[in-house]
Each structure stands twice: as C-alpha cells, then as structure tokens.
Amino acid sequence: MSAVSVLRTKPIADVIAQGEADGSDGGPGLKRRLGARDLTGFGIGIVIGTGIFTLTGIEARDSAGPGVVISFGIAGLVALLAALCYAELASSVPTAGSAYTYAYATMGEIVAWIIGWDLLLEFALGAAVVARGWSGYLAELVGLPTAWFGEEGSVVNLGAIGIVLLLGIVAIVGIRESARVTNLLVLVKVAICVFIVIAGLFFVKAANLTPFIPAAEPAGGGEDGIKQPVTQALFGLEPSVFGFAGVLSAAAVVFFAYTGFEAVANLGEETKRPRRDLTLGLLGTLLVSTVLYIGVSLVVVGMVPYTEIDRGAPIAAAFNAVGANWAGVLVSIAAVAGLTSVILVDLVAMGRIGFAISRDGLIPPSIAKVHPRWGTPYRISAIMTVAVALLAGFLPLSALADLVSIGALAAFVLVSVAVPILRRKRPDLDRPFRVPFSPVLPIVSALACLYLMLNLSVETWLRFAAWMLLGILIYFGYGYRRNRLAGRPQPTGPRPAGPPAADPPAKESAAA
C-alpha cells in the first residue's frame, strides 16, 4: 500500500461517460426523467421539514432568543455558498454521486470514500430521525397510541417503520413517481408555511422581539464537558448561552434544517438537461427555503416570548397561545406532509450515493444493479430502506440529530475545496455555471462550513470520528483492493483536453 494508491483519482472522462450512460435506451444507466421543476421540488421537499417545525422553538428558547432569525439567516448564507460550489460541479460533471464523485475526481480515492461514507450517515440518520418525528405528529393529529407511535416510552415505533417502508417502495418503483409524490407534498407544506407567515404577522408583538439578541449568560451544568461547543472547549471559554455566541451555536444546529439540498446534485444522471436544470434546482431550493425559514422563525418569536416557546411543537403552540387554535390543525397537516417528503428524498438520495460507490467497486458492484423497467438502483435502495426502517423503529435518535449537521458540513467543505482544484486540473472542462470570485468564494465557503462545525458539541465530534473510523476499516478491508481503479496505472502528466460535457438527449423508454 502507498500514499499514491489511496489518493488515486477517477478520470473526469470516466465520470462523464458513466453519467451519459442513459438507461432510457435499455442500457445499464439511470433513466433521465427530471426537469428543473422536479429538482426544485425534491430540494424543497427535503429541506423544509424538521427544522421549520421543531428547531425554531428549541434554539430560540435554549440558545438564541429572537436572534434565532439571524441564526437561520447565517445558516442559509453558508448553505448558499456551498450550493454555488455544488452548482458549478454538478452542471459540469452531472453524476449520481455528487460530493463523493467530485472528491474522487479531485482529491483522491480515500477522501472520496470518507465523504461517501459520511453522506450515507447524513441521509440515513436524517431519514430515521424525521421518520420518528413524522410518527409523533401523526399520533397527535389522529389520536394514535403513543406506545407504538410516540417517542417516549415506546420499545418499537411502528409508525416510523411503516412510513419508511412505504416511501422506500415509492423510491424503488421509479424516480418519476417519487417526483410526483414529492411535488404534491411540497405544494401542501409551502402553501401552509406561507399561510403561517401571513396569519402570524397579525399576532406579532414588538415586546416579544426585545431584546432581539438576549445578553449572554452562563449555561446550565449540563453544558460543560463534551456537551459544550468545540470552540468553547478549545479556547477554555466558560460555557454560555445567548449573546452572539448563542446565535452562532444556534446557526450550527439549525443548519440541520438546510441539510439535504445536495440531494439535488445526486440526481444529475436522471436529469434531462443537467447543465442548466441542476443549477436552477440547487439555487431555487435555497432561495425558497431560506425566505420561508426566516419568515416563519420571525413570526414564531414575535407571537410568543422566547422563554415560553414550546420545544416540541413551537408553531402550533404559538397559535394556540394567541387563541388561534384552528391553525394548529393546519400546522400538523403541514408537518406530516413536510416530514413525509423529507424521508422520501433522503431515501432517493441514499440510493444514488450507494449506487455510485458500488459502481466504482468500493462496495460490492452487484448491489448497484439498475432495474430494467423502473430505471432505479433497486437493490441498494432496498438495502438502505430496511436499514433506515430498523434505525427509525428501534433507536431514539434525537440525541444524534447533530450528526446530520456535521456530516453535511464536512461534505460541503470538500465540495468547496474541489471547485478550485478541478479548475486547475481541468481548465478546459465546459462549465455552464461558474462560481464567481473563485477561488476566494469557495475558500470562504469551506471556512464558513468548518467554523459552523466547530460550533457543534465535542460529543458530536466524537461520534462522528467513531463513524469515520468504522468507514476507514471497511475501506481497507474491502474497497482498497477491489475497486475499479485498483491496478490501473495513474496518469503522470497533464490529461489531454476532452470534448466538453453536453446535455444528453432527453428520451424515455416505452416502459416508462
């Protein structure tokens, strides 16, 4: 084993060739059936969910006060910087693996494996956490027994298992069917979120927004040790909440609300016009989601004093507190619809990431098989669905939610770094969208993501390190010797300029 072999890179020509293997003509690739509207629907479907319905209340009450609005703005800005980097790479090299494949082409195999392993953690854990939240909202909405559908006191969460298996079937049967379900759910929850903002403005009181950033104060006894943010532990600062430090800590946590938009980049091989539509889908998702998050969080902290905001259901409780009980039913409906779409897009994204890793031989290639009629990687999707169902059914994952944020931020750091590296390696590559002010803006994006990571707890970092260690063991135990590049000589000189990547023809099979 040598450093060169673990840092071997995947030729861009291979990535483009795999991406152009359109399954619409009966070949082994994925079928191209998605447009810009479908991609935006998938993006909003996964982004607007748990964050808007739960994190607003938790972080306003415990960390930032009304300043949680600024936290959502900061997190949205960092996500936008990362989305610009994703847009350049996705439009230039449309692929099913997104950050995993970008790292493979720029920074080397072991980095790609680590980020692919990291993304599987992000989407699997995110789907499991959201599935348990979905089960709880459904139980509250229709009066189901909490022993089987709640978070407290339940041994097995049947609601979480059921929704994961059902949506896993939808994800396996076809990408177009998944897009239709997602778009319908997105229409419901966006309409209700707009309603929340408009109706809530009539109940906002200026007194509830003062002070907008409460003065910093010492944290409780549970915030020391491994529970405190890494920045406080590194510099020996006294654990505290509120103040601008509290706003930043809240921004790192509510970044969870934006995670998943990168799922859009995973659909590059199923997009009819990836050079245009991937950029529109990524940036459209972040624009709509950030505006809604800031609007809803402002209304919630304006309706109720932040010290009285309900941690579990902050929006519904805020309307109940001002006497608008009827709005709580609409909020619960929006939550069920919102969380359903999050789970579905998580499962779709996991299947595509697993497909890309398996196709490269870092895990057994047999599980990357594409169904001849459905045009989806049905084997890896089924495996991921069962794994998520077991996690959601038997493990109370609320304490692990921060792992979703750290996993996404780690991926964003590498994607941001990949932009200037790929520009230097392949200046000839056709780039339909280019990040402005490169390499400055990608470097700022990477540093901003890293800073938010450092505002997560020491405990989260330790759990993340344990997951990464497990991934390293799997890589050296299997993928290092069995992948497609093993034994292939690596180029030592500059690569010849190849033809620019073009949008493949948009066609569909008769079976569609």
Image (tube, helix red, strand yellow):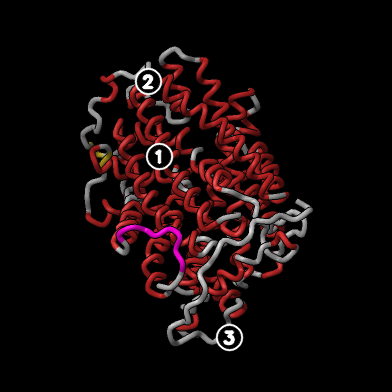
Tell me the element at label 2.
helix
Closest to the observer, 178 or 301: 178
The mark nearer the N terminus, 1 or 2, is 2
The mark nearer the N terminus, 1 or 3, is 1
Tell me which secondary structure the magenta stretch mostly adopts: loop
Specify the amino acid type for callout 3.
Answer: Gly
- Mark identifier at residue 290: 1
463, above or below 490, in the image: above
- Using the rendered view, name the quadrant where residue 286 is placed: top left
Residue ID at (54%, 61%): 94
Using the rendered image of the protein, determine whether residue 383 is visible from the camera's viewpoint. Answer: no
- Mark identifier at residue 101: none
**Disc 2 crowd, CA 10 A, few/some/many (<14, 14-19, 20+):** some
Using the rendered image of the protein, determine whether residue 119 is visible from the camera's viewpoint. Answer: yes
Give the label, 2 or 3, closer to the camera.
2
Residue interval drawn in magenta: 430-437
Q: Label 3 belongs to which residue? A: 487
The mark nearer the N terminus, 2 or 3, is 2
